[in-house]
Amino acid sequence: MSTLAFSLSDFSWSRLVDVEWYWAALASFVVCAVIINLLAVYAGLNTLIERKIAAAMQARVGPWQVGPHGWLQWAADALKLMFKEDIIPLQADRMLFRLAPFVVFGGSFACWVALPFMPGWSPVTMNIGILFVLAVSSSVVLGILMAGWASGSKWALFGAMRAAAQIVSYEVPVGLTILGMLLIYGTLDMQKISAMQESGGVFGIVTDTHLGIFSWGAFRHLPFTFIACMTYYTGALAETNRTPFDIPEAESELVAGYHTEYSGMRFSFFFLAEYANMFVVSAIATTFFLGGWLPPFGTFFSHVLGIGHGVWIMPEGLGRMFEGLFWFFGKSFVLVLLMVWLRWTLPRYRVDQLMDLCWKKLTPLAFVNLFAIGLSEYNPWIGLGLGVVALGFVGELIRREVMAPAPVEHPKIA
């Protein structure tokens, strides 16, 4: 007791406060709390917007009862999920069943902390930002497999196997596409990648002048970077299990896929993870191809109209940060809305069509484009020749996958 009394009396709270990790832990808790609440509100509003768009495209009303014009329906759905009964099947592996939603959501949520939301600020500043995002997002596959196996249902297991095969397959063309862009930028820091697009050029001709959208990564080394943008976005659609690549959750075949047996708040974690992934892949596309937090205006507009130099009612530095936040979220939300639009426009792929598109079309295209970008950095003319070949490949791909009518299969007569 005397030793314990001596140690307690000798303890000083001021020493604990002075330690740097204490403030770092407090700041991390605050940032994580803000991001989680932002993610929850974003996911709720996104579901409402998606339902409104679906209703408009299908000539029906959509959510209308809760709140003005139904705009509080997402809040009512969130309350319903919070109070809904949580059921665990008798044949389920209870520990893995409980753990899987948190693994899936944790992998999606961790990607948000490395995104460059505004000039000079990210929740976590690191010089390997894109490498961290790609590594952490891979843990989602583990959570999906855990959910499918632990549910004790063949439908959930089939959906989990489909999802794992799909995500792992499409990570190949996505990774090759990002690798090609890293050859151009020469850094893994996503803040620096956004800042480098403030001055750029077309066809590999680098200038110090801000050319507006022509300084963005999608136009930096035409046609390779534009092909890379299309390849990345197609692969990102498949990685997030969005239509036309939503076969892991095919309701006509697998009820609801790997989360068939989940209900209540555990189901909502899968729901949040899907919409979090949609924003993450859109934010990466914004950072690499659409200028990040930079405004879509050239030098003339910036100087003459005063755009790009901060809001007038704020100090220049603070105004520039809020303006960058606006443009970053605006560009990312446009890409998210494009995913929503495609869901209610395109039919679902079959499993064989999905793998054929990945391994026979997107992956060779990503390899050729990577090789062309590397050569264009060394010799622009050789790279341009390969770029023409890649453009021809893209044209043929679009003709076969989008424009060509599906063959009519006549029933065989026994």
Image (cartoon, rainbow, N blue to C red):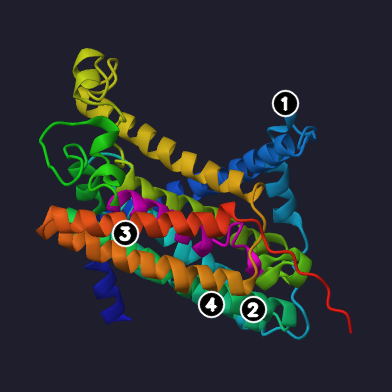
What segment carries the magenta color? 224-248
Foreground of the two, 318 or 260: 260
Q: Is residue 304 above or below residue 268?
A: above
Q: Is residue 371 left or right of residue 331?
A: left
| Magenta-drawn stretch, dominant element (helix, strand or loop) | helix
Label 3 is placed on what type of residue?
A: Val
Q: Residue 68, labelled with which disc?
A: 1
Foreground of the two, 289 or 263: 289
Distance CA(mark 4)–CA(mark 3): 30 Å
Quarter of the image where the C terminus is located: bottom right
Magenta region includes residue 234 = yes
Between label 3 and label 1, give the one nearer the viewer: 3
Q: Circle 4 sits on which residue?
A: 165
Label 2 is placed on what type of residue?
A: Gly
Per the image, label 1 sits on a secondary structure element best described as helix
Between label 1 and label 4, give the one nearer the viewer: 4
